[in-house]
Image (tube, grey):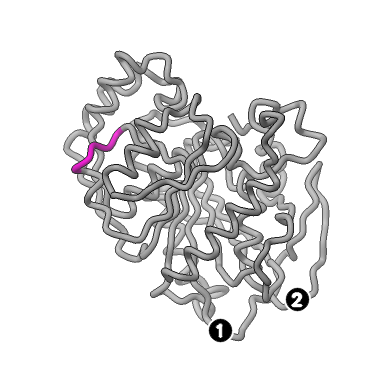
Amino acid sequence: MFRFFGLVSAALCVAISLAKASPKAVDYEAGITQLVVRSDGEDLSTLVWYPTNDVLASWTMGPFKVNATRQAQAAAKERFPVLLLSHGHQSDPLAHRDLAATLARHGFIVVVPTHTGDAFGTPMQSLATVMRSRPKQASAALSAVLRSETFARHVDADRIGAIGYSAGGYTALILAGAQPDFKRAAAYCSGEGARDVGSCLQKGAAWSSPGMADLQSWQPAADARIKALVLLEPHAIMFDIAGLQEVERPLLLVGVQDDSLMPAALNTDHVGQALDVTPVEMPGAHFVFVDPCPLALIEKAAVICKDAPDVDRESVHRELTSQIVEFFQGHL
């Protein structure tokens, strides 16, 4: 769904445009670097945004203006909290480039792995493999940053949060301790949810494949390093109430007013009900959480980039970023 991002990421896997001015003051510029992380025998390209005091050196790649400094020196004043950000189905880290850069300017180190097998530019893997691999990949990327020569002396390993959008919400929930029930998803996607392409990922029959059956006994372990959680319209049809109630971390849950692509009752609101959290509702539909697109891409990727006439995506992102910053500053 996010294929146009891959045209840029294939060249360097780094393309960022700075988010619009946040209502909160910022203390730093944003730096960016790329790490190659090994997970289950595969290489994962992982982008890391981080605070720097270096003078901003803007650059461009394709249609994107990059307002972060490549290979900048990390700010040395203090240790910074770390945020692990998981992208959506068939996306890549560039879908959240503005959010990551802005969080870095607010004093966060932001780790964004490419979910190999479920990202543009990587060979597609089976649904069963993706479901198992996503949380492993995210944890591996986090571990790599925490122990890297570049960042080890700059991270505060006691202050780590996670952000998950869509399928990335599934990833973040697993890391936070949720226990999936894939029979639940299979029953829905092969029955009344057969036309629910948002929740079933256009893979209805795949939920009932032999590989998915093998996951029935899977009990993923939580990543105890994750202390707080932000979920942006999370993909959650594979969790029942009991499985979600294993999550015992502060949560900011954000949904959308137009849930036609991914029904809130089965996803965002379902998570909120299980965890007794009222979702914050943003204007727009599912893709409003993808960063605002450059003008050159709006028509080429209208499904992702275009919103209803009364929805201002840049305004939505200013409010969203402000709430995320405030949440993590209060819980990390």
- What kind of secondary structure does the magenta stretch mostly adopt? loop
- Which residue is pictured at 69% across the width and 30% down the height? 306
**Rendered-image quadrant of the C terminus:** bottom left
In the depicted structure, whether residue 6 falls above or below residue 278: above
**Identity, as a three-letter code, of the amino acid under mark 1:** Glu
Under tag 2, what secondary structure? Answer: loop
The label shown at residue 54 is 2
- Which residue is nearer to you in this view: 136 or 17? 17
Looking at the rendering, the stretch of residues picked out in magenta corresponds to 238-242
- Which residue is pictured at 71% across the width and 52% down the height? 16
In the depicted structure, whether residue 100 falls above or below residue 255: below
**Identity, as a three-letter code, of the amino acid under mark 2:** Asp
Q: Is residue 317 left or right of residue 141?
A: right
How many C-alpha atoms fall within 10 Å of the one at disc 1: few (<14), some, or many (≥20)?
Answer: few
In the depicted structure, whether residue 36 falls above or below residue 123: below
Residue 211 place in picture, x, y as percent: 28, 27
Tell me if label 2 and label 1 are in contact, CB under 8 Å.
Answer: no
Residue under numbered circle 1: 78
**Rendered-image quadrant of the N terminus:** top right
- Which residue is pictured at 82% across the width and 51% down the height? 60
